[in-house]
Image (cartoon, helix red, strand yellow):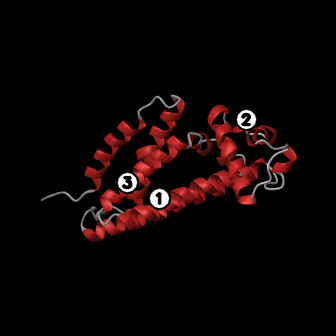
């Protein structure tokens, strides 16, 4: 008989099991039966926490979104230099992808962004939350004179997304063999030069 656990702990186990399945076999492989097998409970026990597969995916996106939001808040609070805060946020995003290799699959899955409007809205909210936190860091850097002011802060934030998303996808496609840290370091150097004020 499976050990009875606190609801929050069990939900976290279900979410992590879903991430494991997606990372190994894709979103379509994520079934209630397979999740239950990984967690070590009967399939019916899953329904005490989630009504269906979509709710589990929504919880997965929620967890990823909370991590992204927390990262943006923490780097902003911990670093007086806005450029350094952005660099550290970038590396935290990379670490998140390396920790949860299913993230690219989920974000690019048709089941998330095309077939399910609720999940699409959740994904959009997650990205908007990251952009909001990053825009605040960029605006602080503009006030400090560390980031150029002739570019809109939100445009710079959107450019930031392009620093790690393609690399995250290549990392996933290669089964973790693609050197994502080296590639992101190179793109960061180019990006940071582009957003800093030019010396006259």
The residue at the point 50 percent across, 41 percent down is 98
Residue contact at pointers 1 and 2, CB within 8 angstroms: no
The mark that comes first in sequence, 1 or 2, is 2
Nearest to the eye among marks 2 and 3: give it.
3
The residue at the point 27 percent across, 62 percent down is 148
Q: Identify the mark at residue 34; answer none if there is no mark.
A: none
Q: Residues within 10 Å of mark 1 (few under 14, many from 20)?
A: many
Q: Which residue is mark 2?
A: 29
Q: Which residue is mark 1?
A: 71
Q: Secondary structure at mark 2?
A: helix
Q: Secondary structure at mark 1?
A: helix
Spatial CA span between label 2 and label 3:
34 Å
Q: Which residue is mark 3?
A: 88
Residue with the most extreme left position? 200
Nearest to the eye among marks 1 and 2: give it.
1
Quadrant of the image for the N terminus?
top right
Residue closer to the observer: 139 or 171 = 171
Residue closer to the observer: 172 or 10 = 10
Q: Position of residue 160 (x, y in %)?
A: 41, 52
Q: Position of residue 168 (x, y in %)?
A: 49, 40
């Amino acid at each position: 008989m499976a050990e009875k656990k606190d609801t929050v702990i069990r939900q976290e186990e279900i979410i992590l099991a879903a991430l494991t399945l997606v990372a190994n076999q894709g979103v379509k492989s994520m079934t209630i039966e397979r999740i239950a097998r990984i967690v070590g409970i009967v399939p019916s026990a899953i329904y005490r926490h989630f009504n269906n597969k979509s709710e589990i995916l929504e919880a997965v996106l929620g967890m990823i979104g909370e991590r992204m939001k927390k990262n943006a808040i923490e780097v902003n609070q911990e670093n007086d230099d806005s450029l350094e805060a952005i660099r550290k946020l970038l590396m935290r995003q990379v670490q998140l992808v390396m920790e949860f290799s299913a993230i690219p699959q989920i974000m690019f899955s048709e089941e998330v962004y095309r077939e399910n409007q609720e999940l699409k809205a959740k994904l959009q909210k997650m990205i908007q939350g990251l952009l909001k936190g990053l825009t605040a860091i960029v605006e602080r850097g503009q006030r400090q004179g560390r980031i150029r002011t002739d570019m809109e802060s939100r445009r710079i934030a959107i450019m930031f997304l392009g620093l790690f998303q393609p690399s995250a996808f290549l990392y996933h496609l290669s089964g973790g063999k693609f050197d994502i840290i080296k590639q992101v370091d190179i793109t960061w150097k180019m990006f940071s030069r582009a957003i800093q004020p030019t010396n006259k």
